Image (cartoon, helix red, strand yellow):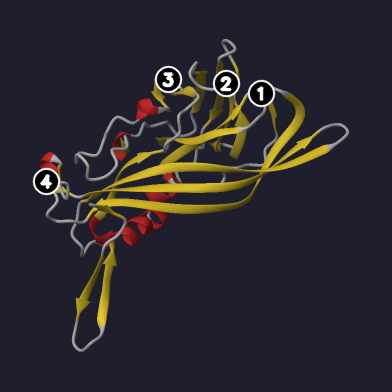
């Protein structure tokens, strides 16, 4: 059976019981406390106030974050008699798996400035990411032995575009579903969400140029994209611009030169090309 948490208790002397750890709490605490997870699941500097233009309007647009809220949904098998309690990880042994769905909801104010008027709208935008865990240690270890093993920045988003990231040396890596090639090994233990192992996240040289290219998919609504990341000049948000044809958009920038972070991720938002309605948001992880 898949459940969100398990509660244990240690019975000591007398009638007082001492609560033991809750797997769900330890997994969500890991996401919020451990540096590698904090970087991959950050919410800072995703919604920026940098001005941008849109295809269907001649005003100057800019967003500002009003509020944000985070929800966790944890899946793991707790029945030791279940065939899915352990998964076979070869040389690593029989291991437990867990999946944490992290959903951030942003309330965003969008201001459109024209020569003779200013219009202000408010909208909600959700970003869903996945943390895939393996229990590599025993309960005496930090976070009762759970370790972050894989990541997905897509959530359930059906992307309206394909996404390609190109490094300074012209080598590239996918920023869409093509990035996520691994699956949980148990057959029904937890949702089989594709992920990329942390060790397989692509590397980008510090302070080098990174070019993001999207191409519209015929089965999805036509959209424009905003991109947020850290560059040499600090955090920024910009709209991808048309390049090489009406269905291709691109943005090139020099990545951050500092070594203060190990895992990094760019944040993308898609909006309908005719009215600017929010379609979805996702993240593309990389390392430096």
Indicate which disc residue 274 carries: 1
Q: Is residue 25 above or below residue 202?
A: below
Pointer 1: residues within 10 angstroms few (<14), some, or many (20+)? some
Measuring from the top left, give residue 208's x and y in whole percent.
Answer: 48, 29
Indicate which disc residue 169 carries: 3
Image quarter of residue 150: top left
The residue pinned by badge 4 equals 93
User: Is 27 left or right of 229, judged from the image as shown?
Assistant: left
Earlier residue among tags 2 and 4 = 4
Evaluate whether residue 56 shows in this view: yes
Earlier residue among tags 1 and 2 = 2
User: Is 53 left or right of 9, judged from the image as shown?
Assistant: right
Evaluate whether residue 268 shows in this view: no
Q: Tell whether label 3 touches label 2 (CB within 8 Å).
A: no
The residue pinned by badge 2 equals 222
State which mark lies toward you, 4 or 3: 4
State which mark lies toward you, 2 or 3: 2
Secondary element under disc 1, as helix, strand or loop, is loop
Measuring from the top left, give residue 124's x and y in whole percent.
Answer: 60, 44
Secondary element under disc 4, as helix, strand or loop, is loop
Single out the residue that lies furthest toward the front: 1
Q: Is residue 1 above or below residue 158?
A: below
Mark 1 to mark 2: distance in Å?
Answer: 8 Å
Earlier residue among tags 2 and 3 = 3
Earlier residue among tags 1 and 4 = 4
Mark 4 to mark 3: distance in Å?
Answer: 39 Å
């Amino acid at each position: 059976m898949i459940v969100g948490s398990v509660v244990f208790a240690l019975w000591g002397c007398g009638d007082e019981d001492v609560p033991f750890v809750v797997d769900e709490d330890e997994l969500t605490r890991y996401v919020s406390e451990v540096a590698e997870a904090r970087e991959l699941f950050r919410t800072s500097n995703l919604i920026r106030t940098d001005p941008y233009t849109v295809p269907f309007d001649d005003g100057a647009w800019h967003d500002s974050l009003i509020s944000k809220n985070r929800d966790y949904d944890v899946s793991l098998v707790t029945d030791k008699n279940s065939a899915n309690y352990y998964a076979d990880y070869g040389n690593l042994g029989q291991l437990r798996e867990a999946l944490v769905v992290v959903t951030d909801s942003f309330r965003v104010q969008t201001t459109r400035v024209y020569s003779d008027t200013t219009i202000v709208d408010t909208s909600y935008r959700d970003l869903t990411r996945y943390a895939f865990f393996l229990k590599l240690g025993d309960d005496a270890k930090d976070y009762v032995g759970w370790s972050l093993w894989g990541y997905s920045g897509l959530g359930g988003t059906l992307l309206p575009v394909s996404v390609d990231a190109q490094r300074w040396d012209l080598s590239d890596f996918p920023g869409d579903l093509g990035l996520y090639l691994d699956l949980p090994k148990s057959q029904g233990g937890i949702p089989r969400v594709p992920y990329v192992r942390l060790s397989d996240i692509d590397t980008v040289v510090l302070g080098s140029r990174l070019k993001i290219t999207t191409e519209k998919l015929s089965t999805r609504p036509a959209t424009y994209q905003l991109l947020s990341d850290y560059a040499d000049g600090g955090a920024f948000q910009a709209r991808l611009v048309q390049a090489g044809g009406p269905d291709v958009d691109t943005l090139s920038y020099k990545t951050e030169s500092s070594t203060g972070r190990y895992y990094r991720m760019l944040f993308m938002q898609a909006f309908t090309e005719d009215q600017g309605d929010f379609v979805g948001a996702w993240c593309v992880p990389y390392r430096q």
